[in-house]
Amino acid sequence: MSRGRLSDEFRARTKHFAAGVIRLYAKLPTGREEVRVLGRQLLRSGTSVAAQVREASRARSVEEFASKLGGALQECDESQLWLELLREECGIDGSLTLALEKEASELSAIFTAMIKRSSA
């Protein structure tokens, strides 16, 4: 039932976001503790977005579908925070973070709309 609500293209988009987070994490300088901590937080939340979408695609009810998408929204918003902090407070070049920040914002808007539609 809910699998039809999530296209393969959308699942691939969230997987691509997770892959971008992994690539950024690999480029982060390892000499500063705050960068290591925020990088690990980003790695966890950024990859969780795709995992939550995969789980939503296997939901057994509309309620479970909305709940899993809610989890994806939460992880996506958290990822955006870590990206902003890495750029603004840790001096990580925006050329490394801004595309992921934009994608996190777009995905958050999509998740919000999907959750509203599924709850209506």
Image (cartoon, rainbow, N blue to C red):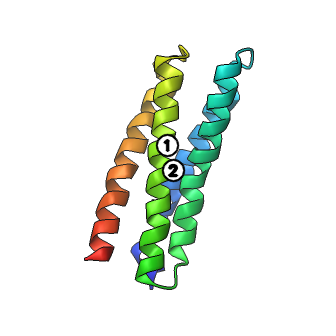
- Residue 55 point in image, percent of width and height: 57, 70
Visible in this render: residue 22?
Answer: no
**Vertical position of residue 89 compared to residue 24: above or below:** above
What residue did someone put label 2 on?
Answer: 75
Neighbourhood count class around disc 1 (C-alpha, 10 Å): few under 14, some 14–19, many 20 upward = some
At horizontal 30% and vertical 75% (from top left) the residue drawn is 119
Tell me which residue sits at (43%, 43%) in the image. Answer: 104
Residue at the (43%, 55%) spot, across then down: 73
Q: Quadrant of the C terminus?
A: bottom left
Tell me whether the residue at label 1 lies in contact with that at label 2, contact meaning CB atoms closer than 8 angstroms.
yes
Which secondary structure lies at badge 1? Answer: helix
Q: Secondary structure at mark 2?
A: helix
10 Å neighbourhood of mark 2: few (<14), some, or many (≥20)? Answer: many
Residue ranking furthest to the right: 31
Count of labels shown? Answer: 2
Can you see residue 99?
Answer: yes
Cα separation, mark 1 vs mark 2, equals 5 Å
Kindly identify the residue that appears in the image at 70 percent across and 15 percent down.
32
- Hey, what amino acid is under mark 1? Glu
Quadrant in which the N terminus is drawn: bottom left
Q: Is residue 120 above or below residue 42?
A: below
Q: Position of residue 29 (x, y in %)?
A: 69, 18
Amino acid type for the residue under numbered disc 2: Glu
Q: x, y percentage for residue 18?
A: 58, 47
Depth check: 100 or 70 in front?
Answer: 70
Up/down of 116 relative to 2, above or below: above
Q: Identify the disc placed on residue 78.
A: 1
Q: In terms of image quadrants, where is residue 34?
A: top right
